[in-house]
Amino acid sequence: MDNSLIIFIIKVSIVFSTLYGTYKFILSNTTFHKLNRIVLLLIIPFSFIIGIIETSIPIQTQNIEIPAFVELANVTSNNAQIINNSRIYSHEINLITIITSIYLLGIIFFLSKIIFSAHKLLVLKRNSEVIKKESYKLILTNTPVYFAFFNWIFIPLKYKCNLNKIIIQHEKSHVEFKHTYDLIFTELFIALFWFNPLVYLYRKSLKTIHEYQVDRNLVEDHNINIIDYLNLIREEIENTTKPYLYSYFGNSNLKKRIHMITTSKTHKNHKLKYLAIVPIMLLFLVSFTKADVLFPVIEKLKNEKPSISPIKNTTKKDITAKYGPMKHPILKSLRHHDGIDIKAKIGTPIIATADGIISSASYEGNWGNLVIIKHKNGYQTLYSHLSKFNCEKDQKVEQGQIIGYSGVTGMVTGPHLHYAIKHNGNFVNPINFMD
């Protein structure tokens, strides 16, 4: 799984969890059922939008040039072997593969549940008696409870000769409110984010809102006696299993439904509570906003010129390959070495040689793990073959700060640091900038 996809999934999950938590603790107890339904349904697309869009503030753009690979590290043996980066990262890759496999298996499992449930309903309908009405169909079938799926209302065969008009009207309201679309939309989201426990609470909240909406509709718009209606709900709940893909009459917690049916309507002034979502949304937009390039900050830096060794307590004697024309140890041809190679054991701390901004910290083929720092007055420093990073792109660093650790990533003949300096786009001799 690509790192950007992992970051996207995490961002969506964080935004979703925060917004749902806000709804649950601030808005869920109001009687604005229609508005609550809208809020719940908008949480999912907004989470995706924040996850996809990386709002950027264009400050100053500049392409970071990765130099062509010319490695001239000393070879201690004629049979020296090129060390491949894949060995170093095999453990990390295997871990990512395992996590990806588990995630994909979860998606397949939940999508299969959706398909199986829908197929089961189609088979059930195909083998049942269908009574067509104006805007819905009554499906008389061998099922223990009433429930609605799109414009189909499934009715237990035992009630064929004694249809309960209140329950029929209840399920008809689910059809009119198009609640099945909400549930399928939610199940697809759950299939993608099954690892987040809050998605299941979200589904429960949405189904509860559906029942609140229908209950209020029946009691107020259809003049159904509240006592008779509540007794009917209680009787149905006793015989109810809990399907997840469709709406059924006995759904949701009885005490909550009784409370919501009998409670007074929330005062309109309480709609101001919904404004609490706005600053949270803005906070996420700001949190995931980044500047394209932060180089103007460089003007405020103090130690703008590289002036120390990238490895503490090293001298010129530790340099195994100098800057300038050198004979390639393997190809035996004369080539220009754009930097210097400093011997270092794997895991040796590598430090920034001047204040600056990390313009790149990534794996770059033969260079292995490469860090490029942008400094003031046109200077750039490059540090390659690192075992791991201790910095990230666009981070401000100070002279002497650890930015990574030496290693053998990329194409190398042994553990060392390749260090180079650019000034106004041209390579210069790093030795001239070391105390």
Image (tube, rainbow, N blue to C red):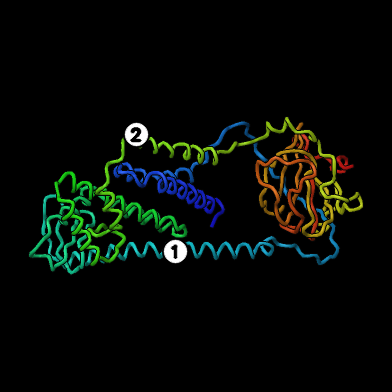
Which part of the image, by quadrant, shows the C terminus?
top right
- Which mark is drawn over residue 269? 2
Q: Tell me if mark 2 has few (under 14), some (14-19) or many (20+) residues whose alpha carbon lies within 10 angstroms of its own.
A: few
Sequence-wise, which precedes: disc 1 or disc 2? 1
Direction right: furthest residue: 317
What is the secondary structure assignment of the residue under circle 1? Answer: helix
Residue 26 coordinates in the image, percent (x, y): 41, 44
The Cα atoms of the two marked residues, 1 and 2, are separated by 43 Å
**Depth check: 19 or 290 in front?**
19
Residue 213 position (above or below residue 80): above
Q: Is residue 336 visible?
A: no
Residue 226 coordinates in the image, percent (x, y): 18, 51
Tell me what residue is drawn at x 16 percent, y 52 percent.
169
Q: Which residue type carries mark 2?
A: Asn
Tell me what residue is drawn at x 27 percent, y 46 percent.
263
Q: Is residue 160 left or right of residue 177?
A: left
Residue 391 coordinates in the image, percent (x, y): 69, 47
**Depth check: 328 or 85 in front?**
85
What is the secondary structure assignment of the residue under circle 2? Answer: helix
Counting the numbered discs, the total is 2
Q: Tell me if mark 1 has few (under 14), some (14-19) or many (20+) residues whose alpha carbon lies within 10 angstroms of its own.
A: some
Tell me what residue is drawn at x 57 percent, y 33 percent.
57
Q: Which residue type carries mark 1?
A: Gly
Badge 1 vs badge 2, beta-carbon distance below 8 Å:
no
Give the number of the mark in front: 1 or 2: 2
**Depth check: 224 or 102 in front?**
224
Q: Which residue is mark 1?
A: 106
Q: Quadrant of residue 330?
A: bottom right
